[in-house]
């Protein structure tokens, strides 16, 4: 057996390479695609080819499926990695495929990590996919909807591969044990630990299994125990892609747990991201955002607490800084919630975009020169501190045409309830005032 990229013989190769299946019946996992009468199974059995994209986490069989597909349909497979391949490699692959096509042969062009090709590089494949020069098969760990060009997506079918579950790992172990030597066995506890740390990644599982057996003495009968696995996995972490879907899914889960006042959920996702290698300073910045977006003036202290946690992380690092982030997360999750500030600012931004550059009313303009004063800048301005409660009843501070706009609507939760009462008090003063500045007094009224 050779590996995908034309490498060494299987003898002496890693366990994952030695177990790479030769036939579809040897494939472990992905029963939703490869089980009886399932989509990819039918493709393989009928020997048909169409362009497709395999989307799934690392180590679930994307490359293996592409190879089996090529072998089952009698196509030559040309494999490139978007990490290493350049324009020259792509051109050579297409030229080779075009030559084979004239001879009546099909070519499956497999692009691993296709999301790493830029838009122009992805577009370069379109004519050759369109005219049938190549059957395009891409593999990606990222959501194709965001990372693959829509023109390429429209010419392919997306198959989503799933992480390995307990049953798939059990089947994988059954296939692996004969390769590990006569008498090889794995205790239930050791298997459970390996599965947990593999986190759905079959390749990682097999690599860990092989290394663990290398740690055992050369006895005729060797059983892998939990103790050996713990020694091996002391510093292992769960799967976490700092720039991909896993990252954004988890930060989304953290934010929504805080918004939903689930302190336990918020702590779990914070711990999950820290464990996976997320930058604590990035998490601190997101917590500040949550304090303003989801709590706002319902509890103004939330913003200060998150900034304090950020500063602790910057000054002390882990583990003290991480604990400060956990303190901030618990406070945010249990604080009264309000999106009033967030919604008010969005509404103000919408008016700025839609109403254009409305002029500043004359009475609000600065008047540092005599000419500006002569033009009416600052005329009839009423100084708030000259009035009771430092408030001028009937005054307007919005441009003409927006004079009656109300952006901020406090909730009845937390400190914002007091702000709502203050706002109602000021509204009543405006209504009762005998003097009202009308829009006609403002330059630019519409």
Image: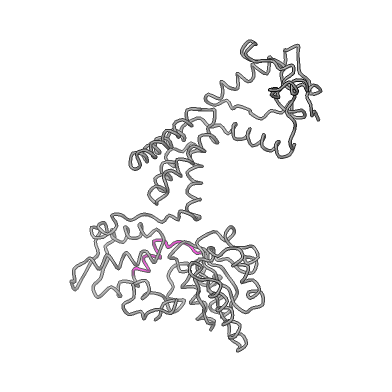
Residue 241 in the image, given as x and y percentages of width and height: 45, 56
Left or right of residue 338: residue 275: left
Q: Residue furthest front?
A: 370
Residue 388 drawn at (x, y percent): 63, 10
Judge by depth and name the residue closer to the eye, 300 or 93. 93
Asked whether residue 166 is drawn in magenta, I would say yes
Residue at the spot 59% in from the left edge and 85% down from the top edge = 99
Q: Is residue 267 above or below residue 64?
A: above
Q: Is residue 182 left or right of residue 24?
A: left
Which residue occupies 45% across, 66% down?
A: 60
Placement of 235 over or under 354, stated as above or below: below
In which quadrant of the rendered image does the C terminus lie?
top right
Q: Nearer the viewer, residue 379 or 216?
A: 379
Q: Residue at x 63, y 76 (%)?
A: 128
Q: Main secondary structure of the magenta part?
A: helix
For the point 50% across and 56% down, which residue is it?
A: 244
The quarter of the picture where residue 374 lies is top right
Say whether residue 284 is left or right of residue 104: left
**Quick one: 176 or 381, which is closer to the camera?**
381
Q: Which residues are magenta?
A: 161-173
Residue 13 rendering spot, x and y as whole percentages: 34, 76
Q: Position of residue 307 (x, y in %)?
A: 45, 34
Q: Magenta includes 111?
A: no
**Residue sticking out furthest to the bottom:** 103
């Amino acid at each position: 057996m050779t590996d995908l990229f034309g490498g060494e013989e299987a003898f002496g190769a890693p366990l994952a390479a030695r177990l790479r299946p030769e036939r579809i019946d040897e494939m472990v996992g992905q029963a939703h695609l490869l089980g009886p009468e399932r989509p990819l199974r039918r493709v393989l059995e009928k020997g048909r080819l169409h362009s497709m994209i395999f989307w799934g986490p690392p180590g679930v069989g994307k490359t293996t499926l592409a190879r089996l597909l090529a072998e089952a349909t009698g196509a030559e497979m040309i494999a490139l990695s978007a990490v290493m391949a350049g324009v020259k490699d792509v051109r050579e692959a297409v030229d080779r495929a075009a030559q084979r096509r004239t001879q009546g042969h099909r070519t499956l062009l497999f692009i691993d990590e296709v999301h790493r090709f830029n838009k122009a590089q992805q577009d370069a494949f379109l004519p050759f996919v369109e005219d049938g020069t190549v059957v395009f098969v891409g593999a990606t760990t990222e959501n194709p909807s965001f990372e693959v060009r829509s023109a390429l997506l429209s010419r392919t079918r997306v198959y989503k591969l799933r992480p390995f579950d307990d049953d798939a790992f059990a089947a994988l172990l059954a296939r692996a044990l004969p390769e590990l030597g006569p008498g090889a066995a794995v205790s239930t506890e050791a298997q459970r630990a390996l599965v947990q740390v593999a986190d759905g990644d079959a390749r990682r599982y097999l690599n860990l299994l092989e290394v663990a057996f290398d740690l055992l003495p050369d006895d005729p009968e060797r059983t892998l125990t939990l103790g050996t696995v713990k020694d091996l996995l002391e510093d292992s972490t769960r799967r976490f892609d700092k720039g991909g879907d896993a990252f954004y899914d988890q930060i989304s889960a953290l934010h929504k747990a805080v918004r939903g006042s689930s302190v336990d959920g918020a702590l779990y996702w914070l711990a999950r991201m820290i464990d996976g290698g997320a930058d604590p300073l990035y998490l601190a910045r997101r917590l500040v955002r949550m304090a303003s977006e989801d709590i706002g003036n319902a509890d103004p202290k939330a913003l200060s607490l998150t900034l304090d946690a950020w500063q602790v992380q910057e000054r002390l690092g882990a583990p003290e800084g991480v604990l400060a982030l956990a303190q901030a997360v618990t406070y945010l999750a249990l604080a009264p919630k309000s999106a009033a500030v967030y919604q008010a600012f969005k509404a103000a931004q919408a008016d700025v975009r839609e109403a254009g550059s409305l002029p500043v009313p004359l009475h609000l303009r600065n008047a540092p020169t005599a000419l500006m004063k002569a033009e009416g800048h600052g005329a009839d301005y009423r100084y708030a501190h000259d009035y009771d409660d430092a408030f001028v009843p009937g005054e307007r501070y919005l441009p003409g045409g927006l004079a009656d706009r109300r952006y901020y609507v406090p909730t009845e939760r937390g400190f914002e309830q007091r702000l709502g009462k203050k706002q109602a008090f000021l509204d009543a003063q405006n209504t009762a005032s005998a003097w009202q500045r009308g829009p006609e007094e403002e330059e630019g009224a519409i």
